[in-house]
Amino acid sequence: MKLALIGSNVKKSLSALIHRNISFKLGIDLEYKLISIKKEELKDTLEKLKKDGFIGFNVTIPYKEEIINYLYKIDESAKKLNAVNTVKLENGQWVGYNTDGEGFCESLKYLNISAFNKKIILFGAGGAAKGILGSILNQKPKEILVFNRSFDKLEKISKLFLEFKNLKISNNLKEIELQDFDIYINATSVGMTPNDEMMIFDSKILNDKKILYDIVYIPYKTKWLRESKHTKNIEGIYMLIFQAILAQEIWNNKKILEHIDIQELKNICIDELI
Ligand code: ATR
């Protein structure tokens, strides 16, 4: 099976490692090619992949939106978010999907965490945050507050999820009572290498009943998670692994989650990161 990852700079992607391991577990011989291209090369790249026998690919920064222009159709998961991270060749045409949000929620399920009736704060309003929000709202949290430093993206989010009355927005951290939540999700790039010393807020103040999920996975454990000693802390590698498994389910057209040893896959990734 021939798959690929398309982005602007994908030389050091963990996705290749994850997909090779998943395919190995499934007994599938996989070629997973890393393709770094400029925006103008997207159209030709997609044609070439088709000609060369690729049956699908992942899309990463900064082409998750741009790629839509070159796809035959996109499914509901990608339409609402206007972003695609997984593409499959169906009847000779490229079809786009988005597994980011569902990957996040599947990882919560795996870790026995329910968002139902919980008070949640989500930091960030970019592509990743939107995906997470779309999926987590379906789990009926009591309230979800989205914080972002710039207001324009928050307004867009408000419009996108207008039907959810339990969704609130803020761009002023000072007016937020930070102790007030059950689940804290960092979906910004704050704390990502090379800015390892940055935190979205000082997590030391939180107590042991809280859950912290940082979607940043480089470094493997961000300062925001490291400084919060009493809470249940979840590393971004989980979301990365689950969105990859869901992409594999699309490409293989079957459920595969039960065949994957998540802890083993996580350890393989950690070995690569540390
Ligand atoms: P992604 O697709 O990974 O979500 P993105 O769409 O560029 O990437 O979004 C990045 C998010 O991280 C945004 O919410 C951004 O906030 P702004 O909308 O205000 O730019 C947030 N972010 C990045 N650096 C940040 C920083 N230093 N402080 C606070 N938020 C930051």
Image (cartoon, grey):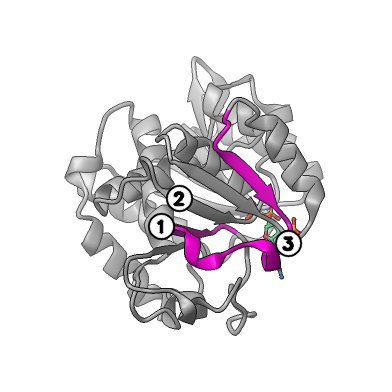
172 falls in the magenta region: yes
The amino acid on which the numbered mark 2 sits, given as a three-letter code, is: Lys
Task: Give how far apart the Cα atoms at labels 2 and 1 are.
Answer: 5 Å
The residue identified by callout 2 is 119
Q: Quadrant of ligand 1?
A: bottom right
Characterize the local packing of mark 2: few (<14), some (14-19) or many (20 or more) Cα atoms within 10 angstroms: some
Which residue range is magenta in the image? 164-187
The amino acid on which the numbered mark 1 sits, given as a three-letter code, is: Asp
Identify the element where label 2 is drawn. strand
Q: Are marks 2 and 1 in contact (CB under 8 Å)?
A: yes
- The image position of residue 189, as x and y in percent, is 62, 65
Q: Are marks 3 and 1 in contact (CB under 8 Å)?
A: no
The residue identified by callout 1 is 182
Q: Earlier in the sequence, mark 2 or mark 1?
A: 2
Residue behind label 3 places its C-beta within 8 angstroms of ligand 1: no
The amino acid on which the numbered mark 3 sits, given as a three-letter code, is: Asn
169 falls in the magenta region: yes
Q: Earlier in the sequence, mark 3 or mark 1?
A: 3
Look at the picture and state if 255 lies above or below 57: above
Judging depth in this view, the residue of 256 and 207 nearest the camera is: 207
> Is residue 54 something that shows in the picture?
no
Task: Give how far apart the Cα atoms at labels 3 and 2 are.
Answer: 18 Å
- The image position of residue 60, as x and y in percent, is 60, 50
- Looking at the rendered image, the quarter that the N terminus falls into is top left
> Is residue 73 something that shows in the picture?
yes
Look at the picture and state if 210 lies above or below 95: below
Task: Give how far apart the Cα atoms at labels 3 and 1 are.
Answer: 20 Å
Residue behind label 2 places its C-beta within 8 angstroms of ligand 1: no
